[in-house]
Amino acid sequence: MTNLNRRQLFAAGAAGTVGAVATAASAGAAENHGGPGGPGRPGGPGRPPHGTTLLTGAQRAAASGWKVLAGQKVGVITNPTGILTNLRTVVDEMHESGAVDIVGVFGPEHGFRGTAQAGDSEGTHTDPRTGLTVYDAYGAGVEKMTSMFRTAGVETVVFDIQDVGARFYTYIWTMYTAMRAAVAVDARFVVLDRPNPVGGTARGPMMTTPWTSGVGAKEIVQAHGMTVGELARYFDGEFLPADAGERLGELSVVEVTGWSRGTPFAETGLPWVTPSPNMPTPDTALVYPGTGMFEGTNLSEGRGTTRPFELIGAPYVDYRWAEALAALDLPGVMFREAYFTPTFSKHTGVVCGGVQLHVTDGRRFDPIRSAVEMLVAAKRLYPDFAWRYDSYDPARPYWIDKLTGSQRLRTQISAGADADEVVGAWRRELAAFDARRRPYLLYRGATR
């Protein structure tokens, strides 16, 4: 989801003292209520998908008649992924039900209705379907978000977006900014939770403070292995006391039922709605925490193809890369020699040689380790390999450092380190993060 040229970077500030204790609560049991879909309409808002008992937080809230939001002026942060099983958005359902007083919708990157490309938003406007004001929340700092909440009169903030589990996917940082703003206006914060499509295992390097930005605003690892509800609990306990002066007065997570941490998205029974234009399938999400790092190189990460982040290559790459990667016999993934011509972004209109990743076992596949092996091999094979250099940020010019959280990965690979050395360098910080996050986890299953 990160954009190579236009992304606004922001850094989270730190101030204040430890304050009030937050409350984490779940909504009541899901009941088969009607709503606009009605009990007799297939896939109505209270009905689970055929053949599954998994219910998202949004589905449970709708089934209870939106009781968790009753009597409050509600601001909703969502995008096209915030749907019920009838495939209608939570905003449309809340609005038409008459049970929720929505005073504003807040659109993240790509917008509330999802019309904008990477690095863009829909701007502040009136939604033609509902007549509600949609505020542009993409790239908004705490002060701007606080001002929007005050203008709208928000008493409860609702967050419902399908995340993909990578630190550099910007929706979680929109959520954190909104949490800080909610503290400022003394608003409740409600997360309608959804599964993490890449599972519950934490992987990769830790963000370090000098390299925080809009693609990693706080110190978490590259693949955090949490749902957005769990992340909200972690942010509330670990970061808000310093950054906002206190914790949220009330944090409620409407939990997913019927999901465990190791369940692949394909087994959830949920429809995949594209969270951003370059995240078309659950397969994309599986590889993205690793191959997203190629945004920090001069190789195409597959934007402008039908398989972004699965197709990786450059005009100077030949068959040798695929052969070298296949010889590694990495668990859960195979590499196919591939050629493609991007229609936009890097190398537009130029034939690129490279590879396509084919994930054969999502439970065994380690996207970050696999991507490190790819980077090491590309650097070794091709003199034209280079790290992306951003002249607009002379103090921190290498995008890969912002993506990985420090200069370490870049300098190690540039110096000829192998993948074992690169991955081994973050083992202790990953273990420390994994232990620190455990009190905030809500769902059972493998975490490492």
Image (tube, helix red, strand yellow):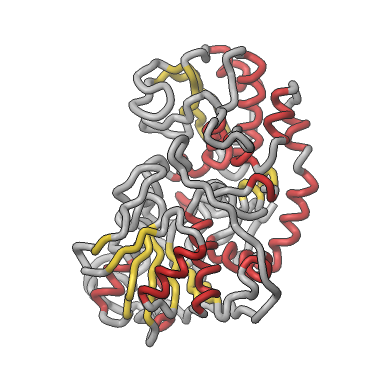
Can residue 57 be seen by looking at this rendering?
no
Q: Is residue 430 left or right of residue 201?
A: right
Q: Is residue 378 left or right of residue 171?
A: right
Point out residue 57 in the picture as x, y percentages from the top left corner: 45, 69
- Vertical comparison of 135 with 385: above or below: below
Kindly identify the residue that appears in the image at 41 percent across and 59 percent down: 137
Point out residue 328 in the picture as x, y percentages from the top left corner: 66, 23
Point out residue 187 in the picture as x, y percentages from the top left corner: 49, 78
Q: Is residue 296 left or right of residue 211?
A: left
Q: Is residue 55 left or right of residue 295?
A: left
Kindly identify the residue that appears in the image at 70 percent across and 51 percent down: 448
Q: Toward the viewer: 107 or 283?
A: 107
- Vertical comparison of 241 with 98: above or below: above
Q: Residue furthest right?
A: 428
- Vertical comparison of 267 with 244: above or below: above
Kindly identify the residue that appears in the image at 37 percent across and 23 percent down: 348
Q: Toward the viewer: 161 or 62?
A: 161
Q: Quadrant of the N terminus?
A: top left
Can residue 151 be seen by looking at this rendering?
yes
